[in-house]
Image (cartoon, grey):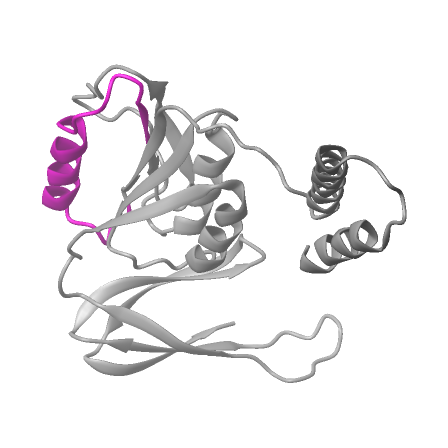
Amino acid sequence: MPVALAWVSWLAWKSDVHIQRWRRVLAYGLRVLVVTAVVLALAGLQWKKPQGGMNIYFLMDRSQSVPNAEQQAAHRLLTSVEKQKSDKAGLMVFGSDAGIETSLSATMLETNVIQTVVGSDRTDIAGAIRLGTAAFPEAGQKRLVLFSDGNENIGDAVQAVMAARPLDVSVDVVPLNTQGGADVAVQRLAVPGSIKKGQPFDAKIFALSDREQPATVRLFRNDQLLGEQSVRLAKGKNLFSFP
């Protein structure tokens, strides 16, 4: 921009045309306006109207890691949220999958009992964020409010948030307390480095438990269940084999 304006000023100063002063000033002003408009157009300048109203989707974590008391407290909180007249709110629930409980509405959320059923054995925060982002209308501001303990074991929530930013979707988080105790972590899955086609092999699972407790070990391949075992976990390290 400074270079273009300097060029226009230089042309006006070097001009040998003899005209009245007010005409020279007018011509200079018109040239400046034209050059400015061309430069801004090439730069991709756009005029955006202010977006009216806020569209809010509440995302509630219904996985097993969130105690029922925390889920109920979150439900009471979001149903008591005060909105502006131009605001709209809706509710989604999620676990291993996500579903829409109520669509965007200008009225208060009045869901005494959540009807939408989702899997509770896993936590896919990223899937809930993607569903919420896709459900927003074009007009209005867009905000997701996430009620979760953050213990995701499917997907990548951070990547989902980054993907939502270019779409003008903001994400706020209300942390929930987790279900304490009975923690089990799979440390490693070991399989042979090479086997012949059709040759049977054992898959070894190394797990760590914070206490002695019963558990069910399930082995999946591409989300397809291959087998399961009922086992007794000892406190500390454990090793199980799947034939």
Residue 115 occupies which quadrant of the picture?
top left
Q: Is residue 65 above or below residue 133?
A: below
In this rendering, the answer to whether 23 lies above or below 2 is above
- Work out whether residue 49 can be spotted: yes
Q: Quadrant of residue 19?
A: top right
Q: Is residue 67 above or below residue 133?
A: below
Which residue is depicted at the point 75% across and 44% down?
35
Q: Position of residue 195 (x, y in %)?
A: 70, 81
Q: Nearer the viewer, residue 193 or 120?
A: 120
Confirm whether the magenta stretch covers residue 71: yes
Residue 65 in which image quadrant: bottom left
- What residue is shown at x 86% (from left), y 50% (from top)? 15
Number of on-image labels: 0
Nearer to us in this view, 204 or 127: 127
* Range of magenta residues: 63-91
Question: Residue 112: image x %, image y %?
Answer: 16, 21
Residue sitting nearer the eye, 3 or 25: 25
Return the residue found at the far right.
16
- Residue beneath the point at 24% across and 73% down: 233
Residue 129 image position (x, y, % from top left): 43, 44
Tell me residue 218's x, y (percent): 42, 60
Left or right: where does residue 48 sit relative to residue 25? Answer: left
Q: Quadrant of the N terminus?
A: bottom right
